[in-house]
Image (spheres, grey):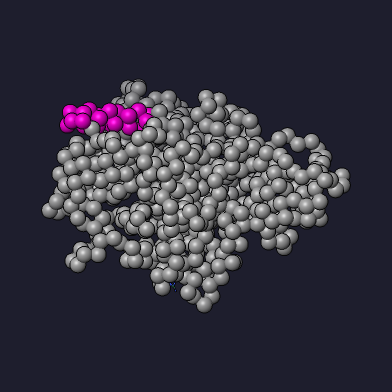
Amino acid sequence: MRQRRPFHRKKAVTKSKTAGETQVSEEKVEEPAKPAVKYIELPPSLTVKQLSELLNVSGVDVIKQLMRNGVMAHINQVLDYEVAAAVAGEYGFSLPGKSDTAGKTAGEKEEKKYHRFHEEPSEHQVTRPPVVTIMGHVDHGKTSLLDAIRETNVIDTEAGNITQHIGAYQVEIKGNLITFLDTPGHEAFTAMRARGAQATDIAILVVAADEGVMPQTAEAIDHAKAAGVPILVAINKTDKPGANSDKVKQQLGEHNLLLEEWGGDVICVNVSAKMKEGISDLLENILVVAEVSELKANPDRPAVGVVIEAEMDKTRGPMATVLIQAGTLISGDVIVAGETWGKVKAMLNDKGKRVKKAGPSTPVIVMGLNNVCRAGDALEVVSSEKEARSKLDSRLLEQQIEAITSKRPAKLEDIYSQIASGQIKELNIILKTDVEGSIEPIKLSLEKLSNDQVKVRIIHSASGTMTESDVLLAVASKGIIIGFNARIEPGAKNLADVEGVDIRNYAVIYHIIEDVEKAMKGMLEPVYINVVDGRAEVKAVFTAGKKDKVAGVIVREGKFARGSSVMVKRDGKVIIQSNVSSLKRFKDDVKEVNTGMECGVGVDKFDDFKVGDILETYHKTKST
Ligand code: GDP
């Protein structure tokens, strides 16, 4: 296996033209079934990397284990036998004694799946600028950093040329362009992904040097990782007296970000957005990451892109800021964007200047669409107005089909069929708990459920309420949300209902494990919900026959049918669930009674009606 080319800062500013060089995928090696007692032979000394390979765990895990034992080590650091033996012991290995053979097992290496847009034959592809999103905890300086980058590096500084906020801007550094998306935060990033669009190539994680890793920092790391987007760390506010970069770096290690200086591949740069320090270092390193990611696109094809902002302008009509991902958009092209279409009348670049063309990774304002499209909509050029209309028709049809057959976010009870049909190989779980201490045991137990067919991955875990951001991550990753005594934000509940995301909250850890295990074996009963068919209010109570009571009701909504399930509610509480045993209108038995009509209703095994009771007929359906 070839090793991934290591980062090297010196290469930062040389533009990549290495068409022949490809990145080698090295899938993570599944843990082999281990015998009850595991023996290992260790050489007198070995590197952290070699030890991790021998133990079949990641280098990051070994480094973390060393940290717990008070040893700060990087991946290539040589460890002596005693230290290595202690770590091996933590992983349950027995050591027969010192050996003179160095470890040589094939190493596990986490492969990042970098996204490349619109794969095409490599001869048509040329290097394109990276598209960058800034993420991080609130107040750590995302906006300030975006401003500092813009102010110090915007190319066009002609007098009177006001830089427009169009949702993205480009800067130039030593002859190379970088595109920044202007809406910072992982929420915006994941919202786009939830809509099927991935615009970002590189995530800049801003961490304030005085505060360190905070909850949203951890969230941002997980969101970027779930998307397979490489992370570059900017430690900000280094001008502040309380700044402590080393502490931040250590915390990042604890969050599985292995920094370059410890032999990992995550670059970390010290900056101060306030003092505008470290900005060019940051930009140069973005180019390093871009180079390794080998971002390419074919400019000589009809454009495809993604809408990053859209609005109605009073004088100019619908305007959309589009990030071109491949091809070149040319004035006059006929385009389809989401559910809108039009002919490109005019285009403005991020400096507000009219342009006639926009190539890969360029953000442009597009005018000429017939309506306002939405952020995350895909844009494509079509050959004619006729094709635009038929494309829209087929998009609408696709949406309708998807709405009916949608398998997008996973449902726990559908997992088995999706595993069986090969649709999923990973069960992505977002775990939210009431207290921090519950995370690790649940996480470990869930991950242990992985088998040959499907891997259980906890893509994000944190203590706290289940938020909209969790739901979006679930949509974007086709995952489910599991709560342990966790509250759900009302907005998150609504969004989950709309998006069809499965949220399950448990009070007993064992039940979580049991349900996920059952789901993976196809034994989990689906969750049924009641759908109300008719609602009626009791206006009077009569005696029918010898002693049976019948409620005289008026149907307020829907319809009442004989034989249907019914619940009787009093003061908002269900007092009985039963069936409609009789339904009469003017002494005649009827099958159905519609809204606005009065009728007499008998309920099986119940005759304690009171005026004002609400009767609801319903049917059960599988929760979607
Ligand atoms: P955001 O919420 O992450 O977008 O953070 P902001 O960019 O709004 O910054 C939050 C606060 O931190 C503001 O008061 C900034 O002036 C301040 N700030 C941002 N960057 C720096 C920095 O490098 N040094 C110092 N001292 N303050 C900063």
Residue 116 in sight from this viewpoint? yes
* Left or right: residue 622 compared with residue 364: right
Left or right of 267 in this view: 189: left
Q: Which quadrant would residue 340 be assigned to in this image?
A: top left
Q: Residue at 17% across / 28% down in the picture?
A: 386
Ligand 1 in which quarter: bottom left
Q: Residue at (34%, 66%) from the top-left corner? A: 152
In-image side of 310 versus 214 (left or right): left
Residue 12 placement (x, y as % from top left)? 46, 55
- Identify which residue, 459 or 323, lies in the foreground: 323
Q: Determine the residue positioned at 25% across, 30% down.
A: 391
399 is higher (above) or lower (below) than 224: above
Q: Residue 259's x, y, as percent?
A: 57, 56
Query: The C terminus lies in which quarter of the figure?
Result: top left
Residue toward you, 608 or 322? 322
In the displayed orientation, state which residue is furthest to the left. 315
Per the rendered image, the range of residues in magenta is 383-404
Q: Main secondary structure of the magenta part?
A: helix
Residue at 70% from the left image edge and 52% from the top image edge: 48
Residue 395 part of the magenta-drawn span: yes
Where is residue 8 shown, x and y percent of the image?
53, 54
Residue 182 can be seen, yes or no: no
Which quadrant is home to the N terminus? top right
Q: Is residue 165 magenta?
A: no
Q: Position of residue 90 (x, y in %)?
A: 76, 51
* Viewer-side residue, 416 vs 151: 151
Q: Is residue 475 left or right of residue 309?
A: right
Q: How many marks?
A: 0
Nearest to the observer: residue 419 or residue 152:
152
